[in-house]
Amino acid sequence: MTAKGKAGRAIGWRKILVGLLLLPALVAGGCATTPKQEESEPAGEGQTVTLTAMVVGKPTERYRLENLKAAAERLNKKLAQEGQTVRVRVEGKLEDRPWEEYKQKFILAAEAHKAPDIVLSGHEDVAPWSDAGHILPLDEYVKDSPVYRDVFPNLWKSVTYKGKIWAIPQDVEARPLYYWKPLLRQAGWTEADVNALPEKIRNGDFVLDDMLRTAKALQDKGAVEPGMGFWTRPQPGPDFYLFYLAYGGELQDPATGKLVLDKQALLNEYRFFARAAQQDKVMRPTLIGTDWTIWHRTVMGQKVGFFHGGSWQVAEWKDKYGLTEDKMADLGYALIPSGIKGKPGVTLSHPLVYMVTAQSKHPDLAARLLLEATAPDLNTRHAVASGHLAIMKAQLDDPEYKKSGFLHAISYMVEHAKFLPLHSKFGTYDQIVYRGLTAVVAGQMTPEEAVDTVASQLKAQLGDEVVVR
Amino acid sequence: MSGRPLFRGGRLSAFFLLPFLLVVAVFFVVPVVLTLLVSLTNMSVATGLSGYDWVGLENYRRIVQDPVIGRILYNTVLFVGLTLALFNVGLALVLALATSFLSERWGNAFRALWLLPRITPSVVYVLMWRYFAAEPPYGILNQVLQGLGLPAASNWLHEAPWPMIIAINGFVGASMGMIIFSAAIRAIPRHLILAAQLDGATAWALIRHIVLPHLRWPVLFVVAYQTLSLLASYEYILLTTNGGPGYYTTEVWALYAFHTALSNYFGNAQFGQGAALASVLVVMGIAASFLYLRLFPFRKLTDRPKIEVS
């Protein structure tokens, strides 16, 4: 064999090897096709269409799925009246898992072309998911339905992005400040003082500083142990923005749609937390990161003076943490106090919404199903079972809804509710602002340092998508 | 042996190498290439897998300008270094030596015990630690402390995040080194040990002059291998402190990449930015491997023996 021949053969082998090495890359590259909206199929004569739904919730929130099933029956009746032979059935599972996991599951399913017809999620997902082409605009179905007129207008605002409606509100909540009345009495409050508190917060007579002072007094008088005067939520979530909003902070510029960081409001928020956790020591510096179960048991054990959470947690506490009707009389609730004297208190609503995915083969039936699910009786049974508020005006007169004293009593909070911004980079914004807060609470940074760090990190990560004031 | 060899040139070696090369290509080279490609885009949940734009080195510029990246790097070095020194090599060595001086039956029993953390599903394993560390009156550790009349702290994962995380990872990591070192100790020729014992060597002298010199190569291997696996490891941190408590206190590079690329509360994960972080991690791993190859005399250690003893 000549040397040349040998070399030639070696090159041949090498080529084959390189080709084999590159093969998977080519295959992977070839698979990256563009997801498009599925062709919607006309529903055939006399067939039953199965609509799949992906729904998240705790056992108390089972009606998020059950209402869809009830809506299918109503829709089928209507289809029969219209003389159509097609029928609908709903298939799905109530997923009781953390938000991050749930959303990840939907995104992976959507990218793999295995998305359900209907997905329930927070209203803030309208921005990234519509940008990604995962969901469909619903204006043509919604605009001329009676549902559109009956649902509170600010809820439609929370699902309107780039001028279109992308989702149908499923529930809404308030996030109150809770307190134990007997503890306040132990600290020397009169009955009249205790009863006047929600109104004083609503008028701006009782602000965040007053709350810290009261929490400190509760500890000094021995009503609660040190570090138990005021507790926030123990895990990341929208609630921390309550304090930023309470100091007059803005999250989004209504004119440009850009995210906003108001440095002064953030500094005030961080200073408030530094006082709570580091100076007055009414909140444990290690509170953030506590297990939810331990948090629930502690606040329900009447060991904490003031704490804030969601209105839905009352249902959870009754379900799992021994909150009886008698104890309910001892539990006070109000708006989150403003940070500024004379300004009304605030709350935050995070509406959950149903969306129709771009991969649904029957988007018209899915949208009609969602409109059927948005009915006063169905939304009320969900609200009562899960501790959420009315989303439609008709519910306010519903005797069932009125009977639930707690929901009825906090209905006024929706007027004071603010929403999270609809912006596809809000997740990144939130991670940065949240980490800054945890640094202040743990005493690793002064509020001033944290604000500067957060501002520079936001600039580095979001560039011109955020306006730092 | 005379006569012509059956196969010539590189053909046979290529043939035998092919399965291995294919596996490496499919499971290592291709993912790395794809990660590098994704890191040059602005891919995120909002762009989907198709609506992205090529942004060049923008994601890398952001990493360099990120004010927290120094802290993340420091955490990564601290985590890998201490876990490696104290547990994956240190404790592994202690366990291997201790169990080797026991009878076979007891030694195996103890080694099996130390394998438990590795075979327990990580979520279950971490849940046990969380209940061990929880605040009073729930946590086991605090119950014991209170029982002994000692001051109990709140949650130990918050009080001492790094020691806890290093221990949680280390208890899993120690078993691999333990097995390798035990096997190496067993491979030491018996006559050396017997001779030393005849000369009246103490246990400590035995370990220092006979066992440890024989373990040089396995130790180097474990250090190199475990460095790479610890660099990429984040699941136990994710399940315990999730990078907290406080400001990126225990956020290591791999976890930062995971949070950026795949998980945040409001669900718009940045695939491109996360891929850039992961690419840097790959470079770090390759750099560490080269460093070990330069520092350790691998070639000398893997030389053919001068004579074959059968």
Image (cartoon, coloured by chain):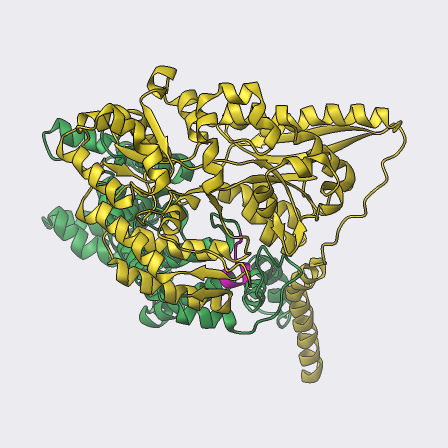
Chain colours: A yellow, B green
- Percent coordinates x, y for residue A360 in the rendering: 74, 42
Q: Residue at x 29, y 34 (%)?
A: A306
- Percent coordinates x, y for residue B200 in the rendering: 9, 48
Q: Residue at x 31, y 33 (%)?
A: A197
B248 over A372 or under it: above or below: below
- Percent coordinates x, y for residue A292 in the rendering: 37, 34
A231 over A182 or under it: above or below: below
Instruction: Please indicate, yes or no, whether residue B128 appears anywhere in the rendered image.
Output: no
Q: Quadrant of residue A4?
A: bottom right
Identify which residue, A184 or A340, lies in the foreground: A340
Q: Quadrant of residue B212?
A: bottom left
B236 over A79 or under it: above or below: below
Identify which residue, A88 or A147, lies in the foreground: A147
Q: Residue at x 36, y 60 (%)?
A: B224
Question: Which stretch is magenta?
Answer: B268-274
Instruction: Please indicate, yes or no, whether residue B191 appears anywhere in the rendered image.
Output: yes
- Percent coordinates x, y for residue B20 in the rendering: 57, 58
Q: Quadrant of residue A10?
A: bottom right
